[in-house]
Image (cartoon, rainbow, N blue to C red):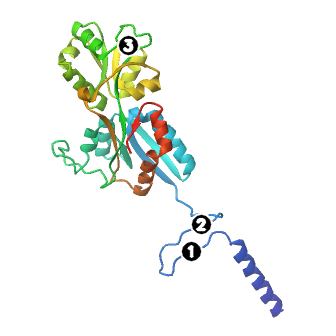
Amino acid sequence: MKKLLALLLVAGMTTCVFAGCGQQDTTTPDGSANVQQSAGGEEAKDPVELVVFAAASMTETLTEIGNEYMAENPHVTLVFNFDSSGTLKTQIQEGADCDLFISAGQKQMDQMDINASAEVNTEGLDFVLADSRVNILENKVALSVPEGNPANINSYDDMVAGLEAGDIMLAMGNSDVPVGQYTQKILTYYSLSEEELANAGCITYGSNVKEVTTQVSEATVDCGIIYATDAFSAGLTVVDTATAEMCGQVIYPASVLNISKNVDEAQAFLDYIMNDASDAIFEKVGFTPIN
């Protein structure tokens, strides 16, 4: 009987070794935490919810890229918050959870970067994770018109003439929105007074670029200044594009935030945004990747 029990015990141990006995405790000799592995031998990854705050002009492209990323990384759930960069900056400052921030302008990122000029970061905010900030995209500031171009506006010069005559209505972003700030520079370039035009009823505003785009799409205005990428996504006609002399370059900076609880995953997604496949998605709507 003792010999039979011994034989059964040995057989059971052999079966366990060859079958793997499920997940193995791989605690290291030094007592460090063990790593569980899947049946296929790959390291099992804990679920991660990654919160990404991004400029509204990236809604379509970043959503597409995000879906592809989650398909390749099923343990990651991406939660996007798309809005004007100024609104996103305020939400982060007020305590919103955010792992990765992508702005449509340098100003909003500078306002949260302790290494930026104190003339811009006037509140001494420190949210940008050291060495993670990078410029990822360039966009263009476009003059767009409704279907059929009823006001016959074919250039920025036409827009200026119409505004000076009080014959047209222009849609632009608010002053705390990057696209609005670029528009203000264009008005200044043409020596136009935004205040006078607004008082004359020639300007209407949007709280982000999508609201301005909607006004043009619905033909409630004669023209609007938006990004070339938003015009593409909305199927709008672009009649002119601003030069760097008129409003500067439109550069999108991105950064992992130092308040993130998922720094490694946030950096991994940021790296993914800058790969060749993501570049192709950005390029098809008019972005120019910078990497």
Q: Could you say which disc has been placed on residue 261 in the image?
A: none
| Amino acid found under the numbered disc labelled 1 | Thr
Q: Does any portion of residue 175 appear in the rendered image? A: no
- What residue would you read off at disc 2? 37
Q: Residue furthest left?
A: 119
| Amino acid found under the numbered disc labelled 2 | Gln
2 or 3: tag closer to the N-terminus = 2
| Amino acid found under the numbered disc labelled 3 | Thr
- What residue would you read off at disc 1? 26
Distance, label 2 to label 3, CA atoms, is 59 Å
Distance, label 2 to label 1, CA atoms, is 9 Å
Q: Could you say which disc has been placed on residue 220 in the image?
A: 3
Instruction: Give the side of residue 175 with respect to residue 79, left or right.
Output: left
Residue at 75% over, 85% down:
10
2 or 1: tag closer to the N-terminus = 1
Q: Residues within 10 Å of mark 2 (few under 14, many from 20)?
A: some
Residue 184 location (% of width, % of height)? 23, 25
Above or below, 275 relative to 195: below
Instruction: Give the side of residue 78 with respect to residue 137, left or right.
Output: right
Instruction: Give the side of residue 104 with respect to residue 217, left or right.
Output: left
The reply to whether the C-beta atoms of the residues labelled 2 and 1 are less than 8 Å apart is: yes
Q: Secondary structure at mark 2?
A: loop
Residue at 66% over, 69% down:
22
Q: Secondary structure at mark 3?
A: loop
1 or 3: tag closer to the N-terminus = 1
Residue 158 location (% of width, % of height)? 29, 11
Q: Does any portion of residue 249 appear in the rendered image? A: yes
Q: Residues within 10 Å of mark 1 (few under 14, many from 20)?
A: few
Instruction: Give the side of residue 197 with respect to residue 235, left or right.
Output: left
Residue at 37% over, 24% down:
211
